[in-house]
Amino acid sequence: MDQFDQRLLNEFQQDFPLASRPYAVLGERLGLDEDEVMDRLARLTRGGSVSRVGAVFRPHTVGGSTLAAMAVPDHRLDEVADLVNAFPEVNHNYQREHRLNLWFVVTAPSKARVAEVLAEISARAGLKVLDLPLLEHFHIDLGFDLKWS
Amino acid sequence: MELSDSDLALVSALAEGLPLVSHPYKAVGAQLGMDEAEVVERIQAMRDAGIIRRFGIIVRHHELGFRANAMSVWSIPEDVVSEVGRRLGDAPEVTLCYRRPPRLPDWPYNLFCMIHGRDRTAVEESIAALVRRFDLGQYPHAVLFSTRRFKQTGARYGRPIPRAAAE
């Protein structure tokens, strides 16, 4: 990863240009041509450093979402994690160090569908699911400073 | 701001990511039956209205060497939790900061912060610094490091791109 990659990753996490050819605008700022910017982004995406060039939406703008937590017996963790992952409405799913050891985010076109997904997961796993919807958010999302230096 | 059906389709398309082609807004518009100017105008409007909180390159912390992440939670009296949340939300160590309902008896905590770092020690140091700076030692607290990532994708709002518009 050279300095152009590092700058691409750190300097364009917000206010992405809305110009007709945005990758050419990035290129102008970096001193690269448009094709090279696209090639680099494609490579960084394949390598996993870039998730996507896209939008982060204010929670609850569209449909519903919640954070859910379960206390899963250790020997059932893989099985229950697979069951949770199988729902396309689940977009994050982590094991964490706590009695409540499985934490996942559910996002769907409606709040009713979110509730339905939680109920289905609870029924299939035979375990309680805690529903922890967002009540207030405090952080202004400016992206993530990669602190290269 | 009311979102139209075409806005919702655009939201879905943008959640998936902008294509890596010379005219990406035109390409997104072609899928949705909108022209380039309309796509740009709607993105701008959603950005101005705060519906889009951030629009740009979305990186993966873990793959870039920020291998440790913890959900740091506190139980804070309801009358002061919003004020504490606002102060924590502005702290540079904090990636996300939310208030959520406690669920007794399973879960007493109502303030959630995500903290990322290169390793576990860095995250622990960040949390200790926050506790000192914001006088959080008085509140019940837990730190939940993540040990495995089973899934991480962009949110799917589940509005499929209308077929007629795609053709």
Image (spheres, coloured by chain):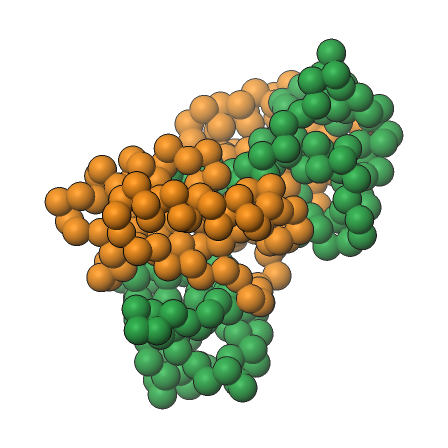
Tell me if residue A67 comes above or below residue B14 in the rendering: below
Looking at the image, residue B12 lies above or below residue A123: above
Identify the hue of chain B: green
Residue A97, placed above or below residue A80 = below
The residue located at (41%, 48%) in the rendering is: A118
Q: Quadrant of the N terminus of chain A?
A: top left
* Residue B53 visible in rendering: yes
Residue B156, by quadrant, is top right
Question: Which of the chains is orange?
Answer: A
Indicate whether A83 appears above or below A69.
above
Is residue B147 visible in this depiction of the protein?
no
Compare residues A84 and A97 and report the one nearer the observer.
A84
Seen as rendered, the residue at the extreme top is: B167
Number of marks present in the image shown = 0
Image coords of residue B134 (percent x, y): 46, 82
A125 displayed left or right of A34: left
Query: Residue B13: x percent and y percent?
Result: 65, 30
Residue depicted at x 48% and y 29%: A44
Q: Position of residue A106 (x, y in %)?
A: 47, 46
Q: Is residue B83 left or right of residue A99?
A: right
Q: Is residue A108 left or right of residue B65?
A: right
Provide residue A26's location: percent of width, then percent of height.
69, 33
Residue, far left: A75
Displayed quadrant of residue A12: top right
Q: Nearer the viewer, residue A31 or B21?
A: B21
Q: Which residue is drawn at 42% across and 35% down?
A: A87
Q: Residue at 55% x, 48% y: name it.
A: A112
